[in-house]
Amino acid sequence: MSRVKRGTAAHKRKKRLLSEAKGYYGARRTQIRKARETVLRAGAFAYRDRKTRKRVIRSLWITRINAAARLSDLSYNQFMHGLKLASVDLDRKVLADMAVRDQDGFRRIAEIAKAHLAKKRERRADSVVQGTG
């Protein structure tokens, strides 16, 4: 049986690992064992933080919408409820973008939400007066 030399595979594997560790400090980029630990850990952080980023961005959108809604005398909660009553299907990403770039358009949407909230209050007041609520 012929002899198999495995040096090239090992060399290729180590070379790939060290190329992934490029830019790390000191032994973390030059020594195989340290580089392997660091690359593995970096991958775990990257995986975790791809999910964290989604939460952070969503909370940023909510903060921007809240700030713009309060300029129209609505809280975030009231604003979103008014949009739901008005059947306005704009997601938070679009609303946050409008809050920053198109204040007039956002103000018009806030007026729509406010009008539908007022209609709901009137209906509720009527039902209380009639004794059904």
Image (tube, rainbow, N blue to C red):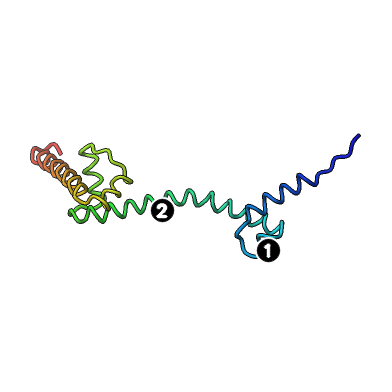
Specify the farthest residue to the bottom.
26
Q: Residues within 10 Å of mark 2 (few under 14, many from 20)?
A: few
Residue 95 placement (x, y as % from top left): 28, 46
Name the foreground residue: 31 vs 115. Answer: 31
Q: Which residue occupies 41% across, 53% down?
A: 56
Eyeballing the image, is 55 above or below 1? below
Three-letter amino acid code of the residue under disc 2: Val
Tag count: 2
Which labelled disc corresponds to residue 82? none
Name the residue tied to disc 2. Answer: 56
Q: Residues within 10 Å of mark 1 (few under 14, many from 20)?
A: few
Q: Quadrant of residue 18?
A: bottom right
Q: Quadrant of residue 45?
A: bottom right
Q: Secondary structure at mark 1?
A: helix
Q: Earlier in the sequence, mark 1 or mark 2?
A: 1
| Foreground: disc 1 or disc 2 | 1
Q: Which residue occupies 22% across, 48% down?
A: 106
Name the residue tied to disc 1. Answer: 27
Left-right relation of 67 to 41: left
Specify the farthest residue to the top.
1
* Rendered-image quadrant of the N terminus: top right
Left-right relation of 116 to 60: left
Residue 91 placement (x, y as % from top left): 31, 42
Q: Which residue occupies 30% across, 49% down?
A: 97
- Whole-angstrom CA distance, mark 1 to mark 2, is 33 Å
Q: Secondary structure at mark 2?
A: helix
Name the foreground residue: 121 vs 48. Answer: 48
